[in-house]
Image (tube, grey):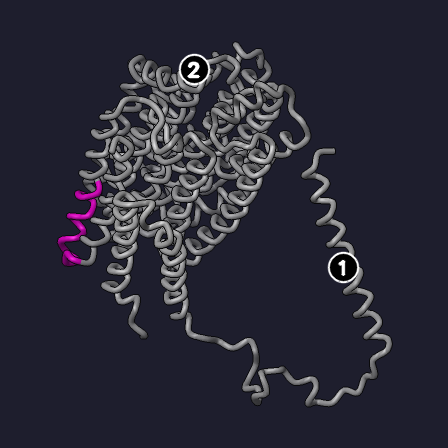
Amino acid sequence: MPDYSLSYFYVLTFFVVGAVFVTVLLTIARLVAPKKITPEKLRTYESGEEPIGQAWARYPTHFYVFALLFVVFDVEVIFLFPWAVLFRALGGPGLVEMAVFIAILAVGLYYAWKKDALNWY
Amino acid sequence: MTDVAAVYPEIIVTIVACLVLVGDTALGRRRATAALPAITVAGLALAIVATVTVVPLGHYFRGFVVVDAFTGFFRAVFLLLAIFATLVSPEYLERRRIPAGEYYATICFSTVGAMTIALSSDLITLFVGLELMTIPIYVLAGIQRGDRYSNEAALKYFLLGAFSSALLLYGFAWLYGVTRATDFAAIASYLVANGVASGPTIVALALVTVGLGFKAAVVPFHQWTPDAYEGAPTPATAFMSVGPKAAAFAAILRVLVGALGPLAVDWSIVIAVLAAVTMTAGNVVALAQGNTKRMLAYSSIAHTGYILAAVAASRAGVSAGAAVLFYLFAYGLMNLGAFACLLYVDLDGTRGASLDELNGFARREPLGALAFAVFLVSLTGIPPTIGFIAKFYVIQPVLDAGLAWLAVVIALNAVLAAFYYLRVVVRMYMYDPEGAVPRLVSPRLLSTSLGVASAAVVILGIVPNSLLEWAQRAAQPLVR
């Protein structure tokens, strides 16, 4: 059997050990722990606040446009970092390539802006 | 700078897409409806001129990109299909209030992705191209945002597309694990040097086959196809059914024949069985469809089977590769045309067209019906159309490769398919329309482009030689 199949065996071992460990602990807790249920304990936990309404609430779908644009620029930054680190090594061509990349993103932002995607309502 | 010169066509199409987006916002609504298709078509035509390459054939970008006859053929096919898809759309987009700028830009971006697949000589370039090709198509399927069916189509296509991409990428990872290379040539030479397929190689081969099978809609990985094709707006369906299919086959040729060619003994019989199942299932289910759009969706699955049969025959050499390329060109022309003919009915507000709606269509729209009839006859494979020549060239290498049973299956399927294609022609010409239906308002651009395309289907069916020679030259780089 080649090496890499063996390393998957380790992963499998960890998986089995982890699953057994969690199951055993939870079962023990379930058997041993005293059960005193009060309405306070059954209430949804909202970081110490009084819960308002159901968890299945409606919320504005406008968020998705912002989420989308956020992801785009988040990924842009991830690309910018390694480029910035190797700025000198990449030199002129690297600068041009990054300018093209940002220009294409800028066109997208311009389009979103003009189409009123950035306006709230 | 020769690296950059090697991808001029891709750069041009990207710039066109950005220009269309900017133009959509900068021009007024009235001027944009006329200007945007014009900009798109002009840009794509310029890109076709640029495919007559200015750089010598060979590898660029440190071996990630290859420019050869194969690349040139597929670039031209993708650009022609994009132009055709652009020309049939404007009237529909205006009538249904679909944002036109986004629509054309999305087609352009998808075309760039497809062209990237054609010029890839590395698993990484290929995967980037495949994603760039499919993600805009998900958008295209759901571009009619207010429509439930369009949303359903986009979501189904997206979920299964993402799933298949994951499988494919996992297969690539195994392949890299075995061969320690992502370059097609290096993978092929490793496989030649190390001989027979081991366990991990088979896993890689299976995952890659399933992943690419999803993209090309091979039975049993086709379930997304009918719903996605039926729900998407009809001009988008027309493009979806040909562009991504041709791109998926470009990927199949590059990976299975190019990189995994030494394993052909292992995969060719699997592909042959898949081809037989695909064409039979596609045709049998298409028989039972009452909606023409859904019928054409299943028929496109059947055609996938015919093309796959030529892939399975790859040991026959250049003629098999040329058959795949020729069939893809023919299929692109006639299938895009057939879906676009449904636009005549769709423009009046129905979804797809039930068979009854096509009764007496020839009296309402004589030229449109004639074009539709030509495309359907070509899809059936009756001479003198390009569809007949394409099937003829598929059967030859299949016989040469010793797969006589597959050739029989192809012939039987052609007979089966004739029933449901010609049924539509009969209804258009020999039935009376139900009630008094007014003559349709002819959309001029749609009629003109369909006229040119149907003429091409017939002319290339009579004189296919130059196209075939081009396909043979393009298939040459695949043979080692």
Q: Which residue is mark 1?
A: A19
Secondary structure at badge 1 equals helix
The residue that label 2 is drawn on is B393
Look at label 2 and name its amino acid. Tyr
Q: Position of residue B45 (x, y in %)?
A: 21, 34
Q: Chain of mark 1?
A: A
Q: Nearer the viewer, residue A70 or A121?
A: A70
Residue A93, percent from left and from top = 27, 43
Badge 2 element: helix
Residue B292 visible, this angle: no
Q: Nearer the viewer, mark 2 or mark 1?
A: 1
Q: Is residue A39 visible?
A: yes
User: Residues under labels 2 and 1: Cα distance?
Assistant: 57 Å
> In the image, which residues are magenta?
B26-40
Tell me what residue is drawn at x 40 percent, y 33 percent: B64
Work out whether disc 2 and disc 1 sit on a shared chain. no
Q: Residue furthest right?
A: A32
Residue at image x 16%, y 48%?
B34
Residue at image location 39% in from the left, 44% down from the top: B132
Q: Quadrant of residue B133?
A: top left
Q: Amino acid at mark 1?
A: Ala
